[in-house]
Image: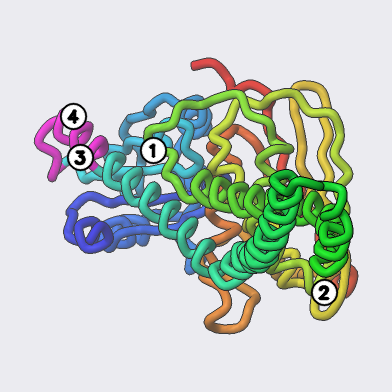
């Protein structure tokens, strides 16, 4: 619906990466860009069309607007901003002055597009989040069914133990009510031996401990799923424990990884970080799942963290097949994937890149084909003011 609306506009609409390369252009923008002297089959970058202060001003969260030359003495009205507050992509609106009624009209249309793109981004983020949960559904069901299974089994044993204990209590009551309780000791001893009360007294505490741990395990998984699947639209930026978020995410994906990789944690000392933790958890989930899928048979996934100055970092490394050098430049592009058809949307890393940029951080990758990959997410401890 959104793409159809953009295609019908007479104004040129371009959505660009933080480095200025084009992600999307509607038909009107495509026609306008072809008239630019620097146009090529690879398309135009923002710095080809706009002065340097335009990207700087927009990158600071302000709106830049002016008239720009577009070849053959042609001037176009241009308006540049980030897609949303704290966003990571640039939105450029181009309009032929002959079609512009007034500056307010350009401003209004730009604002409308910004709102629509922001809403589309939120829907895409939530859809990818739920797709991740769907991908993990079988593993999560196993993680829940396993403790539920042995809790159910333990309850059956507990029911038998209670019957035996009640039978022993009945024997004691008969002895207490008899004229000579000492005469009933032989019967009581026989009952204890027949019902194996000594074994029950040893096994019962362990049975209760296992059952409690099983219920707590299910509670943790359900809580983690609830925290992960909720939308952050109405959530404020909060100080959060990144290690708690990592552990929560690992708890969800572990059944997907446990049969392919050993997990090593090398956590450093981290302060509380100002962030949208649910969104960062999605980044961690995407990186962990990618690490698991990169390992063909058996390998190691290492999750590390640390602090450097006013930044913290989280690193997820694997001993999988690595990424070919020619593909490294494209792994953050929307819909680009190295996985077989049907095993990936190609949106995971692109969305992760956007979330990290939204947090004024960066995501870096170091990979050697045949040896493995290492993704590092660096984030400021506190978000920039204003």
Q: Residue at x 22, y 32 (%)?
A: 107
In the visual, does 110 lie left or right of 272? left
Mark 4 crowd level (few <14, some 14–19, many ≥20, 10 Å Cα): few
Q: Magenta stretch containing residue 348, yes or no?
A: no
Which residue position is annotated with label 2?
Answer: 321
Nearer to us in this view, 35 or 283: 283
First reached walking from the N terminus: tag 2 or tag 1: 1
First reached walking from the N terminus: tag 1 or tag 4? 4
Q: Which residue is mark 3?
A: 109
Depth check: 226 or 184 in front? Answer: 184
Protein image colouring: rainbow
The residue segment tinted magenta is 98-112
- Per the image, label 4 sits on a secondary structure element best described as helix
Residue at which label 1 appears: 233
**Along the horizontal axis of the image, is 224 left or right of 379?**
left
Residue 287, percent from left and from top: 68, 57
Q: Which residue is mark 4?
A: 103
- How far separated are the C-alphas under marks 2 and 1? 37 Å
């Amino acid at each position: 619906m959104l793409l159809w609306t953009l295609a019908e506009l007479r104004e040129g609409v371009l959505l660009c990466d933080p480095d200025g390369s084009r992600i999307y252009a509607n038909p009107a923008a495509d026609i306008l860009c072809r008239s630019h002297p620097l146009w090529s089959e690879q398309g135009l970058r923002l710095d080809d069309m706009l002065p340097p202060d335009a990207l700087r001003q927009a990158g600071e969260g302000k709106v830049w607007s002016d008239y720009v030359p577009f070849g053959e003495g042609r001037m176009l009205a241009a308006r540049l901003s980030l897609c949303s507050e704290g966003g990571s992509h640039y939105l450029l609106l181009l309009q032929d002055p002959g079609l512009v009624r007034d500056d307010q009209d350009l401003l209004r249309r730009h604002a409308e597009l910004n709102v629509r793109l922001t809403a589309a981004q939120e829907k895409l983020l939530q859809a990818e989040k739920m797709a991740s949960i769907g991908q993990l559904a079988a593993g999560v069901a196993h993680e829940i069914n396993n403790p539920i299974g042995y809790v159910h089994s333990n309850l059956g044993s507990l029911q038998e133990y209670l019957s035996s204990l009640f039978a022993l209590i009945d024997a004691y009551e008969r002895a207490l009510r008899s004229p000579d309780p000492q005469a009933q000791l032989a019967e009581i001893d026989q009952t204890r031996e027949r019902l194996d009360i000594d074994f029950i007294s040893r096994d019962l505490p362990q049975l209760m401990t296992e059952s409690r741990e099983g219920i707590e395990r299910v509670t943790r998984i359900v809580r983690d799923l609830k925290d992960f699947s909720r939308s952050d639209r109405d959530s404020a930026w909060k100080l959060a424990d990144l290690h708690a978020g990592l552990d929560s995410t690992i708890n969800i994906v572990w059944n997907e990884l446990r049969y392919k990789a050993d997990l090593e944690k090398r956590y450093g000392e981290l302060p509380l970080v100002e962030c949208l933790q649910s969104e960062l958890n999605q980044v961690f989930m995407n990186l962990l799942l990618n690490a698991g899928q990169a390992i063909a048979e058996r390998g190691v996934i290492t999750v590390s963290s640390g602090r450097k100055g006013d930044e913290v970092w989280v690193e997820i490394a694997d001993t999988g097949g690595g990424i070919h050098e020619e593909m490294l430049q494209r792994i953050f592009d929307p819909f680009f994937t190295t996985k077989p058809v049907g095993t990936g949307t190609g949106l995971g890393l692109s969305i992760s890149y956007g979330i990290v940029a939204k947090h004024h951080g960066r995501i870096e990758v170091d990979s050697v084909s045949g040896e493995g990959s290492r993704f590092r997410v660096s984030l400021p401890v506190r978000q920039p003011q204003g």
